[in-house]
Amino acid sequence: MSSRIGDCKPNDFWGVILNIQFVLNGKNSQVDCEPQETLAEVLRNMLNLNGTKVSCEVQVCGACTVLVDGLPVSACTYLAYEARSKNVITIEGLEKPDGTLHPLQQAFIDEFAFQCGYCTPGMIMSAKALLDENPKPTREDIIHHMDGNICRCTGYVPIVAAIQRAAEVMAKETKK
């Protein structure tokens, strides 16, 4: 049976399994999931992409942030079927084709903008959304944009510095 939310098939518990298709980190992807499964669950449990972290499960900490059609979303509450026919980018998708790190990833390393690292993927994905929209953010722009991401270890000074550094590197790369 075909429906607006994808192809469905029977399931003993919920009644349906959804077959959803989307672009994941630049590659076509297809997965069968239940209607209540979140994007974080599908990424971590079915697609083995464990960079997306789950912490609060109520959309307040930012650890699970991924980009859907370029916008940051909390994958812990974003239902997987909502990603159908969309472009999803996770922390694993930022690496360049030659294996080098994205400037944001490298800047977080260079500025020591992490300790335990649990919040880091969400921080980087939120920062990427900011820099995609505003390639030359002010310190205040960064602080305002990153307000939805919580870090309990590092403090925010090195995180802001890392985003500023990445913006500078990306601006130089754009000029080349």
Image (tube, rainbow, N blue to C red):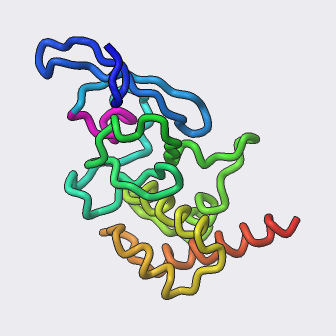
State yes or no: residue 142 in magenta. no
Which residue range is magenta in the image?
Answer: 36-44
Residue closest to the far left? 13
Q: Is residue 165 above or below residue 34?
A: below
- The C terminus lies in quadrant: bottom right
Q: In x, y percent, where is residue 99?
A: 70, 42
Q: Is residue 61 above or below residue 167?
A: above
Secondary structure character of the magenta stretch overall? helix
Kindly identify the residue that appears in the image at 29 percent across and 41 percent down: 79
Quarter holding residue 108: bottom right
Task: Pick the residue in front: 15 or 31.
Answer: 15
Q: In x, y percent, where is residue 85?
A: 48, 35
State yes or no: residue 37 in magenta. yes
Left or right of 38: which side holds 174?
Answer: right
Q: Is residue 97 above or below residue 159?
A: above
Left or right of 94: which side holds 4?
Answer: left
Q: In x, y percent, where is residue 82?
A: 35, 41
Kindly identify the residue that appears in the image at 40 percent across and 71 percent down: 154
Left or right of 93: which side holds 50?
Answer: left
Kindly identify the residue that appears in the image at 34 percent across and 61 percent down: 62
Q: In x, y percent, where is residue 14?
A: 14, 22
